[in-house]
Image (cartoon, helix red, strand yellow):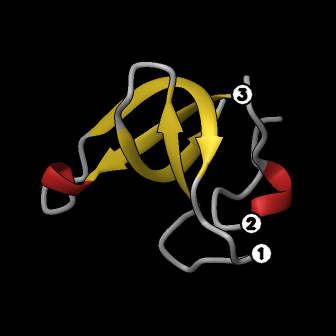
């Protein structure tokens, strides 16, 4: 899965380990890691990353697919 883009919905599915940027961390770019629970973006592509909810409940845009 290494090298896949977090901007394309087709690359993301529930159970995947990802790094996301939370809304509060957008300026710093700090990543939060976890497992995808839900995909929130309906569009197939989003330039800033597909928005997901992690199993922890955190919501953010995918920057890294592990």
Q: Position of residue 39 (x, y in %)?
A: 64, 49
Q: Quadrant of the C terminus?
A: top right
Q: Position of residue 33 (x, y in %)?
A: 43, 25
Looking at the picture, tell me which residue is in the foreground, 30 or 44: 44
Q: Which residue is located at x 71 percent, y 58 percent?
A: 5
What residue is disc 2 on?
8
What residue is disc 3 on?
16
Sequence order check: which comes first, mark 1 or mark 2? 2
Sequence order check: which comes first, mark 3 or mark 1? 3
Task: Say if 32 sits above or below 39 in the image.
Answer: above
Task: Say if 66 sits above or below 43 in the image.
Answer: above
Residue neighbourhood size for the residue with mark 2, other residues' Cα within 10 Å, grouped as few (<14), some (14–19), many (≥20): some
Q: Position of residue 25 (x, y in %)?
A: 17, 50
Q: Which residue is located at x 57 percent, y 56 percent?
A: 40
Picture quadrant where residue 59 is located: top left
What residue is disc 1 on?
44
Sequence order check: which comes first, mark 3 or mark 2? 2
Task: Say if 22 sits above or below 40 in the image.
Answer: above
Residue neighbourhood size for the residue with mark 1, other residues' Cα within 10 Å, grouped as few (<14), some (14–19), many (≥20): few
Looking at the rendered structure, the secondary structure element under dot 3 is: loop
Residue neighbourhood size for the residue with mark 3, other residues' Cα within 10 Å, grouped as few (<14), some (14–19), many (≥20): some
Q: Which residue is located at x 78 percent, y 40 percent?
A: 13
Q: Quadrant of the N terminus?
A: top right
Distance from disc 3 to disc 1, alpha carbons, whole Å, reads 17 Å
Distance from disc 1 to disc 2, alpha carbons, whole Å, reads 6 Å
Task: Please state if 34 lies on the left or on the right of 39 as rendered.
Answer: left
For the residues bearing labels 1 and 2, Cβ distance under 8 angstroms? yes
Q: Position of residue 58 (x, y in %)?
A: 35, 34
Select label 1 or label 2 by which is in front.
1
Q: Which residue is located at x 60 percent, y 77 percent?
A: 46
Looking at the rendered structure, the secondary structure element under dot 2 is: loop
């Amino acid at each position: 899965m290494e090298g896949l883009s977090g901007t394309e919905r087709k690359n993301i599915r529930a159970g995947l380990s990802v790094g996301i940027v939370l809304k509060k961390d957008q300026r710093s770019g700090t990543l939060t890691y976890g497992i995808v629970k839900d995909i929130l973006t309906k569009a197939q592509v989003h330039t800033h990353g597909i928005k997901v909810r992690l199993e922890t409940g955190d919501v953010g845009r995918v920057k890294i697919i592990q």
